[in-house]
Image (cartoon, rainbow, N blue to C red):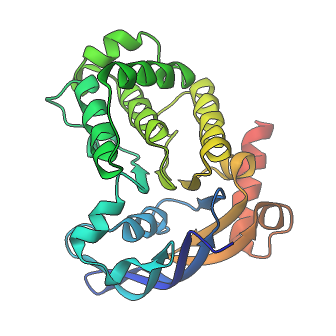
Amino acid sequence: MDPILNVRHLEIKYGEMPAVSDVSLELMPGEVLGVVGESGSGKSTLIRGIMGLLGAGSQITEGDICFQGKKLLDLEQRERRKLMGQQMMMIFQNPQASLVPIRTVEKQIYEAISEGSRKRAGVLNRKKVREQALEAFAKIGLKGGEQILKSYPFQLSGGMNQRVCIAIAMMQRPQLLFADEPTSALDVTVQSQVLDELVKLKSLSGTAIVIVTHNIGIVERIADKAAVMYQGRLVEYGSKDEVIQHPREEYTKKLLNAVLHLERE
């Protein structure tokens, strides 16, 4: 079986300053990779670079990114966009990056699913989409689903908007999903529900997932592989058990010790 994602010697710069340096990793279909590190370590920049979502002034200066054998950096922008929202998706840490404040949640869900349906030449049924949305809401602890569908994002809390974005991703079942701190705005109980649903998405749909987090406990819970980033570099990479139980790098040991310290408190 070939990797669904293969990143080789990736370098990303903000102006002249390196933000990600010489990062190589791969992901198999249905595999979960946890990317962990403190703020500013380059985690989010890495996945934004892979998705083609870098901001102004930043660019990929070295390396290759292959998705299902296609070199993404060689594709025209139009071809690359076709992959987004159908085969590759991203859950942002800030849901405002995904949701339009002046459209109802129901309309945005329908538009997102409709776009994917057109790309697959499928037939879309509004009633069915609504039913699927309510089912997805219930799975991740969003109560009052009917009212949420009628609401605008600005009428909902940040945590509720984040769960709406997660529900949209779950409904579309992409082949590759990037999740940037998807549970950071959620309480502990809801975090657990969301992580459980991500695992189900992997199991039922074969979705490969890259989850970015500062919490190595999340990596321990749901990941197959772990990547530890520090100052833009991949300082440790391997199976979850190998990295967590037998860390080689001092930085990884410090992250693990911090988790153990918090658990004891």
Question: Can you tell which quarter of the image residue 45 is in?
Answer: bottom left
Q: Is residue 238 left or right of residue 121?
A: right
Question: Can you tell which quarter of the image residue 58 is in?
Answer: bottom left
* Identity of the residue drawn at 45% across and 24% down: 132
* Identity of the residue drawn at 76% across and 61% down: 240
Question: Can you tell which quarter of the image residue 3 is in?
Answer: bottom right
Residue 50 % position (x, y)? 41, 70
Residue 153 % position (x, y)? 25, 27
Residue 253 % position (x, y)? 76, 65
Q: Is residue 143 left or right of residue 36?
A: left
| Residue 85 vertical placement versus 227 (above, below) | above
Q: Is residue 159 left or right of residue 184?
A: left
Q: Nearer the viewer, residue 13 or 3?
A: 3
| Residue 33 vertical placement versus 260 (above, below) | below
* Identity of the residue drawn at 60% across and 60% down: 36
Furthest toward the left, the residue is 102
